Image: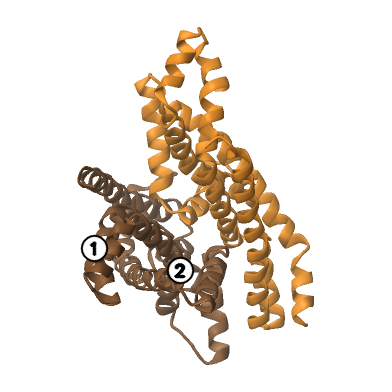
Amino acid sequence: MTFWEIIVSMLGQGLFTTIVTTILAAILALVLGFAGGLMRLSNNRFVRFIVAIYVEVFRGTSLLVQLFWIYFVLPMFGITMSALTAAVLAIGLNYGAYTSEVVRSGIQSVDKGQTEASIALNFTPAQRMRRIIIPQAFIIMLPNLGNQLIELFKSTSLVALITLTDLTYQANVLNASTLQTTEIYTALLVLYFLIAWPLTKGIQILERKLTEGRM
Amino acid sequence: MVWDWSYAFDILPEIASALSVTISATVVGFILALVLGLIWTLLIRSTNKIVHHVANGIVRFIRNTPLLVQLYFIFYVFPSIGIALDPFTAGVIGLGVHYSTYLSEVFRSGIESVGPGQWEVATALNFTKRKTWTRIILPQAIPPVIPVIGNYFITMFKETPLLSAITLVEILQTAQNIGASTFRYTEPLTIVGVLFLVLSYPASLLIRRLELKIAERY
């Protein structure tokens, strides 16, 4: 096979799985991150404690170990899931823990005067968060969230190790059948780069657009 | 029974003994990342346009591709150009090269935080370029970023299980081997998770304290 045939043959199922895993895991991570970040700032000690445990456990152990644990150990407790579900769950939970710290520090870095002003204007706590604090905190969080999206995208290559047919998995299969190792893994690196690099640039442009005239 | 304590204690020594592989891979990879990271930073700062662009391009490429694929590349493709590496060496190189690009960014931010006055003073006092770096700039640029560097050490430690994909027998691979021979994965995989947590959590607390201390001083 030529280099181009190799690239084209990886563009189908493999690319699709990689992108789907990235999108689903990113959504889960964002939801968990915002929920966790807000709960970390709760006045209730118990809520804070629960989130702290979640964050420390998922940041303190390795993503690959979590992935294996969810895919190979949970079935022993009667919880069986497809490779895709396990992948999305593991990556989402892992990056959700990191995102919650980004969200927490973003919210904390909004000036105190903003909170005081919204209390003075008789906003309810929910309105205060939604209308005043989060819109400002989000812009502060954006660079970190962007970096995490790139890291998350790259980490989806691990799902090949639980036999999910993503780009990396497909390269391994192709390698086993054609033995064109050099071309295949070079093509794989190039493909990942061609997705990650525009993503990085896109986030930078978005950042600039959103912060225009604000910071 | 879902969890068997006596089995867990039976296999614990075997998994724990593989920790030496995990930790030495982390340490050697980290040293490589530090040295190479500093080299990238200096090359990118070079006034020579070609050196700047080439170094920048390489760093960008490495940062935007997954470590796992880089490991495959080093382990499976290098032999075809005559460089056959054992799993440990390949793993350490992959880990070190990958994280050197992150550390280079950390060094850059450290160097940029040194005020322009320091450069001017070094020039005024007739310091050589080498002395300016070793005596003036780096001693001020590095200490404030030590906590960030420490965090990357912990991150690298947690990435070492990827090395099992290129057949290095570290703790995750040991746990899997045990699981494959006994058909019980619950205990070995849980032990690996707990070991990571027990080692990395106190380390991250230590770094948080260091961070506060350094923040006081700078």
Q: Nearer the viewer, residue A34 or B115?
A: B115
The amino acid beneath tag 2 is Leu
The subunit carrying tag 2 is: B
Q: Quadrant of residue B23?
A: bottom left
The subunit carrying tag 1 is: B
Quadrant for the N terminus of chain B in the image:
top left
Marked residue nearer the N-terminal end (1 or 2): 1
Name the residue furthest bottom. B82
Q: Quadrant of residue B143?
A: bottom left
Task: Tell me, by letter, which chain the rendering colours brown.
Answer: B
Chain A tint as drawn: orange
Name the residue carrying label 2.
B163
Query: Where is B101 relative to A152, above or below?
Result: below
Q: Residue at x 66, y 46 (%)?
A: A23
Name the residue carrying label 1.
B139
Left or right, A168 with respect to B51, comes to: right
Task: Examine the rendering and report whether any part of residue B175 can be seen.
Answer: no
Front position among marks 1 and 2: 1
Residue A75: x and y, percent? Answer: 55, 46
Q: Nearer the viewer, residue A130 or B7?
A: A130
